[in-house]
Amino acid sequence: MNRYSIIIEWSDDDRLFLVTIPEFADRVVMPCTHGKTRAEAIRNGEEVMEMYLEAWQAEGDPIPEPKTLQVA
């Protein structure tokens, strides 16, 4: 299981749930995927995450660090 953030937002223009992965935003065009339902968007987001992580690892590129919630 990875620990990356996924932001799911509804788009009235696209009539889809759009997926953004904040930790990947400086390396990948966002939103990076979408879904007709929230569940589909989450599944697609997880698949895209794995695809990018595998590609970066295979190419020897640095892997972005997951953000973690800092509780005071």
Image: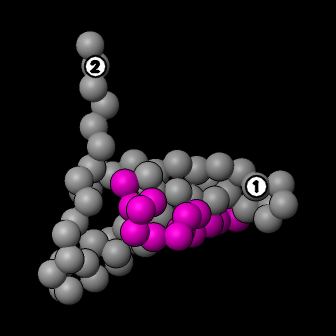
- Residue 31, above or below 47: above
Is residue 25 highlighted in magenta? yes
Where's residue 42, x and y in %? 51, 58
Mark 1 is on which residue type? Ser
Query: At 79% from the left edge and 65% from the top edge, which residue is drawn?
Result: 14
Query: At 55% from the left edge and 64% from the top edge, which residue is drawn?
Result: 30
- The crowding category of the residue bearing disc 2, from other C-alpha atoms within 10 Å (few below 14, some 14 to 19, many at least 20), is few
Q: CA distance from mark 1 to mark 2?
A: 31 Å
Is residue 33 highlighted in magenta? yes
Q: Which mark is residue 30?
A: none
Q: Which mark is residue 71?
A: 2
The kind of secondary structure element at disc 2 is loop
Where's residue 34, x and y in %? 62, 66
Residue 69 seen from this side: yes
Mark 2 is on which residue type? Val
- Residue 59, above or below 6: below
- Residues in magenta, as a range: 23-37
